[in-house]
Image: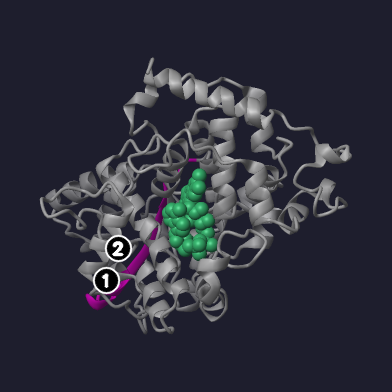
């Protein structure tokens, strides 16, 4: 007699440990069918590269345990019911996702499968707190991070991370009876063929083991001085865990448990608060699904953003003539990641110095970040642009030269990413045009003072005559 399987649908949770859906599926005692359905937006190219490698490596990890990952292509609304019918699956398990489209698909699928007699169980894991749980006394969402994080910390963290299942009994359905499958390495190959991904390949290995290694490296070293060093892009002071968190190779509960086992320090509190920003972003997206596409402050709908294709292109390719901005944008292009301080400076430059709509920048980051997610990206862009609920006021413009001198004083970060400037002295590297320029490096595409005046005048226009 063939035992009907249970299906675990992996989405952004490519890990064996602390995977509540997988653990629950294993505990049913039924054979487990591990699947992924390709749904992602093809224009998120860096994220697509990450996904492709993650599928290959996760498939390999499951194979080592005697199973494998079955990858399907097509709308989940069609693939999953067809798969349940083909295998006679007795239940479907998944870990929750919180982006608006994902939630909508999951709600509809749950109803559809349940109506057909197949139970669906969903679990938490991507966040310390489900986005709807941290609320004010009157049940309202928080709009300010400080209050949100205080409330979240007071709620405590009850759940300890789960160990990886010791053994998994894998289902082995006849592939001929299943909806059409794709090889787990297909996207990886497709992305490598573009010739663009060498820098990504060199920088990252998207799997659970590497996530744990990055966590251990950070906790054993930079954590202690994190509060002091985290804003200096040339120092290896931050965890670089963002893509591993984004794709669920590691969970915040695992990070928290490992971090709080270390002696208390200012670094630890600051690091936990940064994880808190990630949680806050998802809670904002949960109540404001338009976070990545509409100004949360509607008065900015009248902002006279400039349509400047050349400016946008220069910014995206790291050719603005402002060394710190260009170093950041080139780091992004080459590795799919950019240091947080430099993300703020580069984003501010686009929105305020070039007066280009923040949504153009949001889209470029969505294309090129391996850690791209609509919550953190949307919230941070709106924070920088001054258009968010909690945001830096628009009139507060980051001066890219001051930022450069303050956070990359020796120019080590700039030298690493802008080789044309490598030969300049420390004192000249932030303002190459004052040193007569550097071969192959552009002059500033806009002057700081003129840009500042233009941005402030546009902003004053929004507020009308005072
Ligand atoms: P660490 O300093 O080690 O912090 C630990 C973790 O805390 C990070 O991995 C991340 O999950 C979280 N975190 C830290 N800072 C923030 C923050 N400001 N907002 C939300 N979470 C934070 N982060 C993303 O994960 N995805 C994005 O798409 C994204 N887009 C951004 C866009 C802009 C314009 C800006 C200014 C920031 C953006 N960030 C985004 C936040 C931040 O830059 C990255 O999370 C951080 O640089 C990741 O590096 P790390 O893992 O070394 O961080």
**Is 13 drawn above or below residue 342 in the view shown?**
below
Mark 2 vs ligand 1: CB below 8 Å: no
Q: Are the residues at dot 2 and dot 1 in contact (C-beta closer than 8 Å)? A: yes
Q: Residue at x 46, y 36 (%)?
A: 385
Identify the residue at image location x=50%, y=75%.
Answer: 212
Question: Is residue 123 in view?
Answer: no
Q: Residue furthest front?
A: 466
Closer-to-camera residue (54/100): 100
Figure colour scheme: one colour
> Seen from this angle, which residue lies furthest left?
138
**Quick one: 447 or 323, which is closer to the camera?**
447
Q: Position of residue 38 (x, y in %)?
A: 44, 49
Mark closer to the chain start, 2 or 1: 2
Instruction: Find the magenta span and give its range.
Output: 22-41
Identify the residue at horizontal 61%, vertical 22% (top origin): 308
Disc 2 from disc 1: Cα separation: 8 Å
Question: What residue is pinned by disc 2?
Answer: 7
Q: Is residue 335 left or right of residue 283?
A: right
Disc number placed over residue 25 in the picture, else none: 1
Viewer-side residue, 243 vs 40: 243
Provide residue 50's location: percent of width, then percent of height. Answer: 55, 55
Q: Secondary structure at mark 2?
A: strand
Instruction: Point out residue 147 in the picture as x, y percentages from the top left corner.
Output: 26, 56
Q: Is residue 444 left or right of residue 219?
A: right
* Quarter placement of the C terminus: top left
Furthest-top residue in this view: 465
Determine the image quadrant of residue 31: bottom left
Query: Going 32% across and 76% down the picture, which residue do you hit?
Result: 161
Looking at mark 1, is its residue's CB closer than 8 Å to ligand 1? no
Q: Is residue 243 above or below residue 194?
A: below
Say if 159 sits above or below 54 in the image.
below
Asked which secondary structure carries label 1, the reply is helix
């Amino acid at each position: 007699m063939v035992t009907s399987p249970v299906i675990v649908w992996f989405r952004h949770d490519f890990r064996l440990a602390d995977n509540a859906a997988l653990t629950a599926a294993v505990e049913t005692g039924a054979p487990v069918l591990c699947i992924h359905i390709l749904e992602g937006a093809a224009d998120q190219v860096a994220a697509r590269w990450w996904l492709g490698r993650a599928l290959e490596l996760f498939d390999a990890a499951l194979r080592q345990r005697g199973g494998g990952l079955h990858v399907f292509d097509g709308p989940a609304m069609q693939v999953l019911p067809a798969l349940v019918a083909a295998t006679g699956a007795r239940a479907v398990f998944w870990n929750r996702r919180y982006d608006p489209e994902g939630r909508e698909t999951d709600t509809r699928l749950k109803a559809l499968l349940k109506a057909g007699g197949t139970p669906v169980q969903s679990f938490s894991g991507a966040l310390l707190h489900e986005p709807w749980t941290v609320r004010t006394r009157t049940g309202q969402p928080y709009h300010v991070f400080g209050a949100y994080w205080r409330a979240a910390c007071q709620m405590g963290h009850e759940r300890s991370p789960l160990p990886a299942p010791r053994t998994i009994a894998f289902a082995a359905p006849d592939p001929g009876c299943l909806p059409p499958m794709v090889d787990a390495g297909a996207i990886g190959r497709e992305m490598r063929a573009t010739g663009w991904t060498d820098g990504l390949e060199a920088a990252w290995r998207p799997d659970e083991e590497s996530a744990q290694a990055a966590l251990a490296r950070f906790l054993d070293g930079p954590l202690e001085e994190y509060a002091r060093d985290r804003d200096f892009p040339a120092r290896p002071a931050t965890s670089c865990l963002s893509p591993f968190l984004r794709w669920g190779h590691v969970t915040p509960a695992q990070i928290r448990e490992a971090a709080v086992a270390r002696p208390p320090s200012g670094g630890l509190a600051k690091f936990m608060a940064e994880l808190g920003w990630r949680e806050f972003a998802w809670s904002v997206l949960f109540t404001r699904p338009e976070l990545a596409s509409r100004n949360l402050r509607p008065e900015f709908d009248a902002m006279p953003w400039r349509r400047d294709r050349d400016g946008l292109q220069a910014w995206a390719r790291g050719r603005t003539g402002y060394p710190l901005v260009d170093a950041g944008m080139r780091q992004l292009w080459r590795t799919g990641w950019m240091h947080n301080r430099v993300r703020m400076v580069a984003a501010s430059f686009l929105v305020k110095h070039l007066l280009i709509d923040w949504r153009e920048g949001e889209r470029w980051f969505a294309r090129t970040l391996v850690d791209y997610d609509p919550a953190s990206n949307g919230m941070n862009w709106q924070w920088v642009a001054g258009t968010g609920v909690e945001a830096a006021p628009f009139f507060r413009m980051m001066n890219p030269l001051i930022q450069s001198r303050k956070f990359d004083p020796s120019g080590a970060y700039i030298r690493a990413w802008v080789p044309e400037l490598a030969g300049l002295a420390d004192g000249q590297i932030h303002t190459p045009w004052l040193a007569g320029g550097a071969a192959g490096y552009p002059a500033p595409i806009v002057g700081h003072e003129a840009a500042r005046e233009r941005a402030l005048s546009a902003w004053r226009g929004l507020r009308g005559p005072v």
